Image: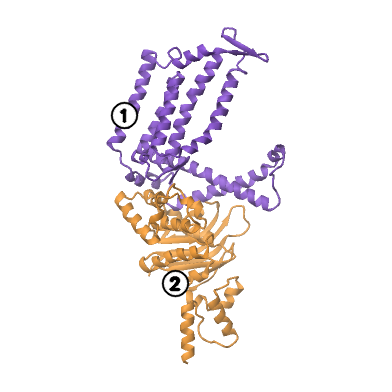
Amino acid sequence: MNKTLLGYVPEHSPIYVIHPFVKLFFMLIVSLFPILIYAPEWNAFIMFVIILLMWFSRVNMKTLKIYIPVAISMGSIILLSYTVLGGTHPEYELLGRFIGIKFYWERIRDAIVVYFRILPMIFTMVFFLSTSRERDVIVAMRFIKVPFVVTYVFAMSLRSAGLVLEDFFIIRQAEQARGFDSTGKPLWYKIRKYIMYMIPLFALSLRRAEEFTNALVARGYAFTGEAAKVKRPDYVLTHYSYKVLDTTLTVAIALIFVTILVLRFGFGYFTLDTSVFIAWLSQVL
Amino acid sequence: MSSIIEITDFSWRYINSEVHAVQNINLKIEEGKFVGVIGQNGAGKTSLAYAMDGLIPGQYHGIKKGLVKVDGIEVEAYHKGVLQKIVGMVFSDPEAQFTAMTVEDELVFGMENLGMSIPEIKERLDWVCDLTDMTPLLAKPPYEISGGQKQRVALAAVLAMTPRVLILDEPTSMLDPFSRKRVFDVLGKLKREQKMTVIVIEHSLENLIPLADEMILMSEGKLVLHEETHTFFQEMDFLLANGVYPPETPLFFHYLKKKGHYNGPIPVTNEEALAQLKCKGRN
């Protein structure tokens, strides 16, 4: 299994045939689709396609279960925000009252529409992170000539997140070993004593920064001066070739995006008025 | 042979510090030598190493006196990134040295900084992977491998830049004995097969002594002894007085010598000791 940013993908997954840039392009462009699409059934269709792609890429589908509580919580928060906290709107169609709260058809409809527009974006991101390693993201960025410094800072950010967590666990264990343990204590106590972890963590982070700088200097990297003017060859890119399939997929994604744009703004597709689901829901409620 | 490193009356005091980290250092290291640097914690070993790599005064604030020349040029006169083509540095904490997401990217990072061509990088990558047995690890993230492997990656990453001087600052301080031996096996290969100048700051003397041509003892910021390895360990009383605890073999022969049971030179390795004992037996 190959470790990805969000899990593992088998070593022989078909996803590796695709150039990392295509995956990044897919994530960036497909994430825009729900912005253009209001009709929930079309957004549900995007989610279905992404699940199919995950299955095709041999992503461990069991890991998707962890997103169910997130999806439920997010849905509940959106629904509550639009209905219970939605305010009074005399111009809307009142469906009923419950303990003094007015429930309008338009607010319920909007909550569902927003929910179904956010979900495909999350699905797209999960698909990308489940099938991409850190290196893939770097390769994709360097492929489109993003400056080395930017890709480097991005890579270091990914890496430092793990390092900070590791340092935090070390500090916590060291403090537990000396009798300081907030396990089982009230939340307010934990918040007050959190500083006990934060100060050493901050000091460690400063030390890490110094060590990183020394390592960079020792490896001949410089942000300024003659060394910064050296033309860097990108060795990592030699492992990846941009094939006909990649071009085809990139063009296909771009074409679908343009088609959606044209259908949406030229012919009025994907709007609430044309939504079969919303029409059905309107009748039900 | 010419001196690749020449240090004259060098002193360094970190800003906000009352005492000198290193003081009045005079040292010449000839090209191609394998030099061991020992001394207690706080003796100034790391500061001396940083001075040779230009990290002092480049990355630290402090007061410098004297000259530190590498290949005949004062370290401060080198442009940024140029000195690192000559001097490579491996730090004690391997984790803190990683700058890339896979072992392969880590190994090529330095070479990319030097602006090498892709075929040259490929050639050197193959060479360094053979030397350090790194090929099976290339695709792995450097922070997911064992401590010993991490330090070999750090060493390989610097070796790939083929510096003329390689400085290792306590490279095995975080490793188990087996991993330590593997790191020193690589250094042994380097000594045999390359003409690289190697300077190793190390507490693990049993691994260092068989490889070292010369030894340096630092104490309280001063260079107190610099001799060829065999001569260095004849000064056993001086070493013990300065907090150095040599390996059992030379220590045992020193004990025998003190008790009047042995009057020859103190052997520094087990092989030499065995030869001495055989020789003694024949006499």
Reading the image, the residue beneath label 1 is A251
Q: Is residue B277 above or below residue B189?
A: below
Judged from this view, the residue extending furthest toward the bottom is: B283
Viewer-side label of 2, 1: 1
Q: Amino acid at mark 2?
A: Asp
Reading the image, the residue beneath label 2 is B213
Judged from this view, the residue extending furthest toward the front is: A284
Residue occupying the point 44% across, 70% down: B211
Residue B21: x and y in percent read 57, 60
Numbered marks: total: 2
The reply to whether residue A128 is in sight is yes
Q: Nearer the viewer, residue B189 or A133?
A: A133
Q: Amino acid at mark 1?
A: Val
Q: Nearer the viewer, residue B234 or A58?
A: A58
Secondary structure beneath disc 2? loop
Chain that appears purple = A
